[in-house]
Structure formats: structure tokens, C-alpha cells
Image (cartoon, rainbow, N blue to C red):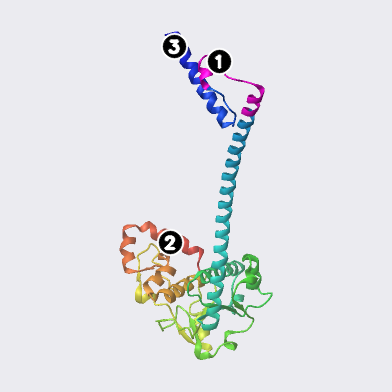
Amino acid sequence: MEGGGEAAGRCGEADSACEALRLLQIDPGDPAEWRAGGAVPCSRNVLRKQKHWEKVIMAKKRKRTQERERRKARQAEGKGTAEQHSKRVLKAIMKERLLEAKESGPRLCVDLSMADHMTKKETSRLAAQIRRLYGANRRAKKPFWLCLTEFVMGSSIYEECFRMNDGFSNYLMDTTQESYLDLFPLDTIVYLTPDSENVLEDIDPKKVYILGGLVDESIHKKLTLQRARDQSLQTARLPIREYMVKTINTKNYHSETLAINQVFDVLSTYYETQNWPAALKAGVSSGKGYVLPDDRRRLRQHPETSYLQGVQDVKDKP
């Protein structure tokens, strides 16, 4: 039995050697002679060719591995280029929309004539609100064309806008030291003030809407309304009372005075959706003491939400 096993082993070994020699393109001779008990040839020439073949196989494996790595690198690079390309395309689309708004309206001006009435802290807040307003307008599908009027070089608000807002000089909007009264016909101007008796019902692309650039922590009542009246201008207020309801809060606080970027959020959303409830929800936080009727029921169940909104509202306080 043992002799038979050894013979079978030699036979299998001979077959394997023959196959290897064929791969190396070497004539293996007559395998029957090997099975009869002859030794497997192991000349230096055979060994050299075997080593060479092994090196070739290893080299091919390394080449395949390197090719896979290069392919992955190209795919990653292509993905990054595509993302960068998408950003460039998006930036171009934003610019095109803004320039269309410059040609066809509507226009929104921030009146900075009252900047001297503010403290340094209030001026910094206004500069931050201008940044938020511009960013929101730039992202809007239907933007306004923006203009800062009476933006006097060397003034406090001028210095703060450049100090706080990176790239301010590249903002795609108009800045001028002139008054809006010198730039537009009186019958096209609508001064937006929370103290107006007139409700803003729609946005007319042919109109020029004015926001008072004022952050006044003491809240001087009817300051912007009086300014508009002195200039014989049309006025309007957001339809907060018409679509929203007062909420019960610990301070019994209810205010229709919004930061300029909050007013813009309302105007921009309405201009895009033609939906006042959706627009007011976008810009009027519950911290102002007003919510949509459906939201009041939700706030009664979760009063902590109103508190958190109030904290956020303090940051944007006009």
C-alpha cells in the first residue's frame, strides 16, 4: 500500500511539473518516463525560467494594483472637478438673476440716512443685518435689486460694513451717497414701516421699496413713518395682523418691528411663492409675539419653542 501511494505521488508531481514547463514554453519531454520513476528535471535553465516567470507574474499583479489606484484617483479628481464646476455654474446663475432684477425690478433700498442716530453696537448690528439680507437675496430664485442709499464714505456704517463683511466691495448691488429721492420718481417709492395704516397687499416690480436702516434698542415710535410723511411718500406695512395672531407670553410682548433682513425674508418669500402666510412664517419669529393660527396650537403644547425663538430674535433685534 505504501509503495502504491509513493507511485501515485510521483505521478501527480510529474503532471504538475509538465504543466509548469508548458506555461514556461519548455518541452517537458515524455511524462511517462517521469511516472516510471525518473526524477523531475531541475536544470539551471529550468529554474532560471521559473524565477523569470514568477517575476513576470508579480510585475503584472503590481501593474494591475497601480492601475486600480490610478483609476480611483482619477475618479476622485473628476468628482472634485464636477463639484467645483457646479459651484461655478451656480455662481453664474445667481449673478444672472441679480442682473435681471437690476433691469426689471423690483428694487429694495436700505435708507442709511438715520445711521448717525445709532450707537457703535447698533451700527455693528445693522452691518450684520445688511450682510444677511444680501446673502438671502443672492440665493433667492427671484431676487430684488438692492441699493444702499446715503451710504457716506467714512461714516460709521460705511466703516462697519467693510470691517465686518468679507468681500463687501464685491457685493452685486448699488451703493450711493445720494438719497433715494434723487434717484427715483416719488410715485414709484413705497416706504415700508410697521406704523403705516396701509397694508402691503402685493409686490409690484415697478415699485421701489424702502427699508429704514435703523437699529434702535430704545425703539423710537413712528420715526420712519414721520420721515416718509415729511417726504410725501407712500407707506405700507407687512400684513402681520391680517394673517397672524398674538401669542400669550410671560412678558406680554408683541411687536411688528423687524430687522431689515427679517423684513426681506418676508418680501422675498412672498415674491417667490405669492403666499403671505408662508412669507410671514419665514421672517416673523414667534419671539415677536405673533404666529400663524395653526402654529399657536402647537406652541400651546410646546411653550419652550416660543422661548427659544425669543432668544434667537434678540440676536436680530432691530
Give x and y (percent) for residue 149.
60, 80
Task: Kindly identify which numbered label has been placed on residue 4.
Answer: 3
Q: Residue at x 34, y 57 (%)?
A: 302
**Helix, strand or loop at mark 3:** helix
Give x and y (percent) for residue 258.
47, 71
Picture quarter containing residue 213?
bottom right
Tell me if residue 286 comes above or below residue 17 in the rendering.
below
Residue 72 falls inside the magenta stretch = no
Disc 2 crowd, CA 10 A, few/some/many (<14, 14-19, 20+): some
Q: Which residue is mark 2?
A: 309
**Helix, strand or loop at mark 1:** loop
Name the N-terminal-most of marks 3 and 1.
3
**Helix, strand or loop at mark 2:** helix
Residue 34 falls inside the magenta stretch = yes
Left or right: 304 with respect to 187? left
Picture quarter containing residue 171?
bottom right
Query: Total label count?
Result: 3
Q: Nearer the viewer, residue 303 or 201?
A: 201
Task: Kindly identify which numbered label has been placed on residue 89.
Answer: none
Task: Please name the predominant secondary structure of the magenta segment in the image.
Answer: helix
| Label 2 – label 3 distance at C-alpha | 91 Å
Q: Which residue is mark 1?
A: 38
Q: Are marks 2 and 3 in contact (CB under 8 Å)?
A: no
| Label 3 – label 1 distance at C-alpha | 16 Å
Q: For the residue marked with disc 3, what is the amino acid?
A: Gly
Tell me if residue 308 comes above or below residue 149 in the rendering.
above
Q: Residue at x 50, y 23 (%)?
A: 15
Residue interval drawn in magenta: 31-50
Q: For the residue marked with disc 1, what is the amino acid?
A: Gly
Name the N-terminal-most of marks 1 and 2.
1
Name the N-terminal-most of marks 2 and 3.
3
